[in-house]
Amino acid sequence: MLSGLSGWQQKEEFVKVKIMLFFFIFSITLISCKEKSANDLFESFVQKTSNEKYIILKTADLTPTESLDGDYLKIIENHDNTTYLLEKVKSIKETKYCIPNLVCPMTEGDIAICMLIDMYQMFDAYFDTVMYENIQRKTDSAKDFWNYIHISEDNRNEIIKKIWLLLDLI
């Protein structure tokens, strides 16, 4: 193809091919760097699979940042995801996630609550005074909190309202 062209024309064609290749690679890179939406990140996170019966949920209050799941971390680092998470807290769709000795299996809503707690770094005093209001403390642990949420839709809605209240204060 290039054999019938002069040396200068061959160089010119070669440069054109290199430029086209550069733009192709650049375009592919841009497409792959596209930021995932909150929905994409959340769905990717909750749909993770494992050979184990449950996947242990690692949250920011107990796990070093570098050990958190990448999708989980991206969600909690971006406060623009708050509205999406507040919509997901109502979901009772079960996942493979679990917090041993607290809640197994977790729902999508449970995971969204954990993400909001991590995102806004809800402090213990808020939990003790506001979140635990109306919750009978049997074990004096978070187990009471999760049991309360799972008893009824009204209880879950009460906790959601308390999260909204905290976000209004921030």
Image (cartoon, grey):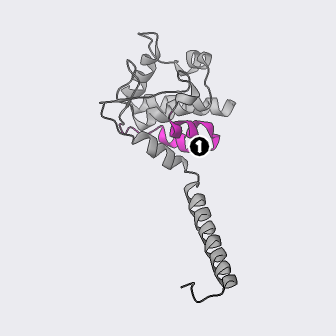
Q: Quadrant of the C terminus?
A: top right
Q: Is residue 127 above or below residue 38?
A: above
Q: Is residue 27 above or below residue 35?
A: below
Of residue 63 and residue 139, the one placed in the foreground of this image is 63
Determine the residue positioned at 53% across, 33% down: 115
Q: Residues within 10 Å of mark 1 (few under 14, many from 20)?
A: some
Residue 149: image x %, image y %?
A: 43, 27
Of residue 115 and residue 31, the one placed in the foreground of this image is 31
Q: Is residue 163 above or below residue 49?
A: above
> Residue 102: within the magenta?
no
Q: Quadrant of residue 34?
A: bottom right
Left or right, 91 with respect to 84, comes to: left
Amino acid beneath label 1: Asn
Determine the residue positioned at 63% across, 76% down: 14
Residue 156 visible in the snapshot: yes
Residue 20: image x %, image y %?
A: 61, 72
Please report the bounds of the magenta region as a residue range: 69-94
Of residue 114 and residue 161, the one placed in the foreground of this image is 114
Q: Residue furthest top?
A: 139
Residue 160 visible in the snapshot: no
